[in-house]
Structure formats: structure tokens, C-alpha cells
Image (spheres, rainbow, N blue to C red):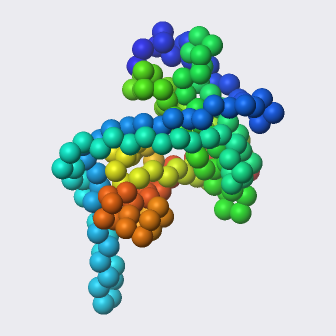
Amino acid sequence: MNSNFMRDIRIVELFKEQKPFSKLKFRYSTKEYYAMTVLRKKDRWEIQLVLEALPKPLEKEFEGGLFQPFVDEPRVFVAEFKGKQVGWMELGFHKWNKRMRLYELLVEEAFRRRGVGGLLVRHAVSLSKKRCARMLIVETQSCNVPAINFYLKNGFELIGFDVANYSNEDIERKEVRLEFGLRIKGSANIC
């Protein structure tokens, strides 16, 4: 990580009243995915996620937005580099189970693998502590190996999955919803 570059990054909160917000355009490519199998035995379940190569590289593109109506207590932050927005993050707090959810996390391609995403995650952890959240959670797909690697590198662990979130054929489509969580240390001591 280039420390001179990171000194020029600022995290700034956006507010809903500042609309309009442009759509976030997510894009990634991968050559592999996590194949999932779920087997029910008489007295147990066997669940496996195995990293496998795709027959051909997969390119995914989709749009997202900020301040979506389904987000509880939304907070949106941007990473700015010399006044230009280069990263975005939206958080929401679930009161009922004291978890902070990371709904959106996007860094412009030219700024990826330079520490911006990690800076946003660290900011999310700090906000989670202040909100007395016990965990920071995020969703991604079994085919988004770059995101999975990023979350693992930043201390998240697999905490769950949904094999029918996007369609009834998520396993066959190689796109199973995976939930990752990061336990927030220290928040229990101050809350």
C-alpha cells in the first residue's frame, strides 16, 4: 500500500438530502467459483464449498443504488481522492440482533488493490463499535471470488448461505448467496 496515496484519501459521509446520487456500477471478472453441495444424510447434513475453475472467465456487471428503502438506519460514506469519489459504502444497523450490515461496497477499478476498500471496512468496523454492534456482516456470491478473497483478507469469516436467494437454481448457476461476518471486538465492553 502506498502511504502517500493513502494520505490523500478522505472518508466523507453523504446524506440523503444531498440527492441525486448516481447509480453504482459494479463489475468484476473471475476464472473460478465456489461449487456448493448440500447433502442430507439420515443423521446429518454435509455441506461443501470447493474452489473450482470456470469453463471460461465470467464477467459480471450490475447496478446498485444508495439509500435504498430496505436499509435500516442507512449511513453512506465515500472515499475521496483529491476531491473525486473513488469508493462507496452503505451501512445499515439491525437493532433486533445488534448487527451492522454492509449493503454496498464499491471501489472504482483504477483504485482497487491500493487500500481504499480496506480503509472503508476499517471505517465500518469503527462505526459498528460506536453503534454497539456485535458483528459486521456482508453478502456476496459464490462466483465473486475477488470479493470473497477481499473479505477473508479483512478478517471476515463465512457465517451462512442461501441456495435459493437469487433463483431456484442458484447452485446450478454457480451463484449461491454467501454471508460473511466480522465479530466486533470491544463493543460489548462499552455498551
Who's the residue at 21% across and 53% down the image?
52
Question: Which quadrant would residue 15 be assigned to in this image?
Answer: top right
Image x and y of residue 128, in percent: 65, 44
Q: Is residue 42 visible?
A: yes
Residue 145, image x and y in percent? 33, 45
Foreground residue, 65 or 33?
A: 65
Q: For this view, does 7 lie left or right of residue 160?
A: right
The residue lying furthest to the right in this view is 17
Q: Is residue 154 visible?
A: no
The correct choice, above or below, for 141 with respect to 85 in the image is: below
Write down the quadrant of residue 175 in the picture. Answer: bottom left
Residue in view at x 72 percent, y 51 percent: 69
Where does residue 10 sit, x and y in percent of width and height? 62, 19
| Residue name at image x 44 percent, y 58 percent | 177
Location of residue 82 in the rendering, given as x and y in whole percent from the top left corner:
59, 10
Q: Is residue 14 above or below residue 149?
A: above
Residue 70's place in the image compared with 57, above or below, is below
Residue at 39% x, 26% y is: 113
Locate residue 130 relative to residue 39 in the image: left or right: right
The quadrant the N terminus occupies is: top left
Number of marks present in the image shown: 0
